[in-house]
Image: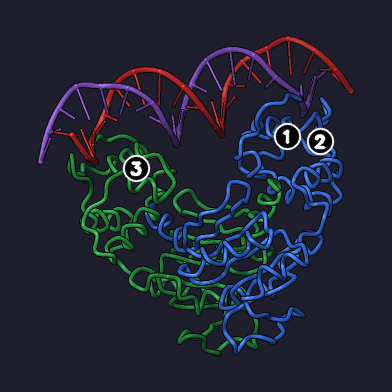
Chain colours: A green, B blue, C red, D purple
DNA sequence: CAGTGTGAAGATGTTCACAGCG
DNA sequence: CGCTGTGAACATCTTCACACTG
């Protein structure tokens, strides 16, 4: 293992490796080669080996990678050994879908609190989460030490919410609003932009 | 303008340019320089100029780009001059959020039909769209000449739905299921993978 | 001897720097 | 004179090819 800088593309692929491994483990597979891996994920096998080698020598020459050991290693690399509690802001279409979303691995991610500005919604419960008044956001996430925020408000309100999240001590934001957020250096952003995806998609059609 | 191959990263940025331009137009701005553009989008100004120059010489030296002209040019490049009708499959959390989603520019994208396998849902209407039996999917999208499909079913069912969409003549798929789809060469895929985004995000925290 | 780990080559994307135009 | 458009330099990422090992 070398102390090289890790390409962000490699980080991009780690979740895919992990997902693939978990399927293999379920099927009772004990080992997987980079070749087999690469076939399943439509990658080059050298890519797989290089990606994994950034983090250590996990493989066995002549054999491949042990599925369980590698999965556990990747979970460790990705910081998936604590359950991440998240604060959701904006309980509209997307927000309420996320509150009942079953796609998160419950081991890893959980929406712990939800906020909205609509008085009609305050106090309601969705999936055991009570919707709170958005003005309490910074105070509440600070008190509960929540480090992950999800923004599901209209674009026009997104920056303000982001600022409040940062104020409350969040270090990562998942943003569904089609807005460019200005964040301090140390706060990481992941953007999910459905319209942008569609616009790109139709370019190629 | 050269006949060079256009980087996919450039295509990635076009929707952002467009969104920025539309805001500028709203504000009554007639021109924008690559420098100003780059500040708003956190890019290098040479990047902006290079991206735009792939499609023609849209700028005026000493002045910049005409906001309206450029916006209209980008819409043309992205194929946003027809309204894209979409077929949604899977009216669960995410699916129903998409049916009432107001984030699509209605000029460009519209969910035209929706399908599910749950008999409880068939026949119901959400936002003027009647939910149909998923077995009718290929036939119906072929009849209506729908070219864009949205997959919002569990990962285990995603490939099957994708196949049926292709059978019905879809040429682009937006997939929300955390599954790797196998598609014919000519069908384009856009993937929205919330859990993957979160997993990447926490790597950096 | 099959399959990893990795330098080196190749491909792709970004930034610099400046000629040249309006 | 300011700003575009663009070769050339630079940076990053991917793939090749093979030495080496379990």
Q: Nearer the viewer, residue B39 or A43?
A: A43
Where B123 sits versus B78, above or below?
below
Kindly identify which residue carries mark 1: B52
- In the image, what residue occupies the spot 54% across and 71% down? B153
- From the viewer's perspective, tell me whether residue B95 is left or right of residue A66: right
Q: Picture coordinates of residue B197 (x, y %)? A: 47, 58
Where D6 sits versus A83, above or below?
above
Disc 2, SS: strand
Kindly identify which residue carries mark 2: B65
Kindly identify which residue carries mark 3: A48
What is the chain letter for disc 2? B
Evaluate if marks 1 and 2 touch, with contact meaning CB atoms under 8 Å apart.
yes
Q: Quadrant of the N terminus of chain B?
A: top right
- In the image, what residue occupies the spot 44% across and 51% down? A186
Q: Nearer the viewer, residue A201 or B36?
A: A201
Q: Picture coordinates of residue A20 (x, y %)? A: 36, 57
Q: Nearer the viewer, residue C1 or A80?
A: C1
- Alpha-carbon span between mark 1 and mark 2: 10 Å
- Alpha-carbon span between mark 3 and mark 2: 43 Å
Respond whether the residues carrying marks 3 and 1 are from the same subunit: no
Q: Is residue B205 visible?
A: no
- In the image, what residue occupies the spot 69% across and 63% down? A156
């Amino acid at each position: 293992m070398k102390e090289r800088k890790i390409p962000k593309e490699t980080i991009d692929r780690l979740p895919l490796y992990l997902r693939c491994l978990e399927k293999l483990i379920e099927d009772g597979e004990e080992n997987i080669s980079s070749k087999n891996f690469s076939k399943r994920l439509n990658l080059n096998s050298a890519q797989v080996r290089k990606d994994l080698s950034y983090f250590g020598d996990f493989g066995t020459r002549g054999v491949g990678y042990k599925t369980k050991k590698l999965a556990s290693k990747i979970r460790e690399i990705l910081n998936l050994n604590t359950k991440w509690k998240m604060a959701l802001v904006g309980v509209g279409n997307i927000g309420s879908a996320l509150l009942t979303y079953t796609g998160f691995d419950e081991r890893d991610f959980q929406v712990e609190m939800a906020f909205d500005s609509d008085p009609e919604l305050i106090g309601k419960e969705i999936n055991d989460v009570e919707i709170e008044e958005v003005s309490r956001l910074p105070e509440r996430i600070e008190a509960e030490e929540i480090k992950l925020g999800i923004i599901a408000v209209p674009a026009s309100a997104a920056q303000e919410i982001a600022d409040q999240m940062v104020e409350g001590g969040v270090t990562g934001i998942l943003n569904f609003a089609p807005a460019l957020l200005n964040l301090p250096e140390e706060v990481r952003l992941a953007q999910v932009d459905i319209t942008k995806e569609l616009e790109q998609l139709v370019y190629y059609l």
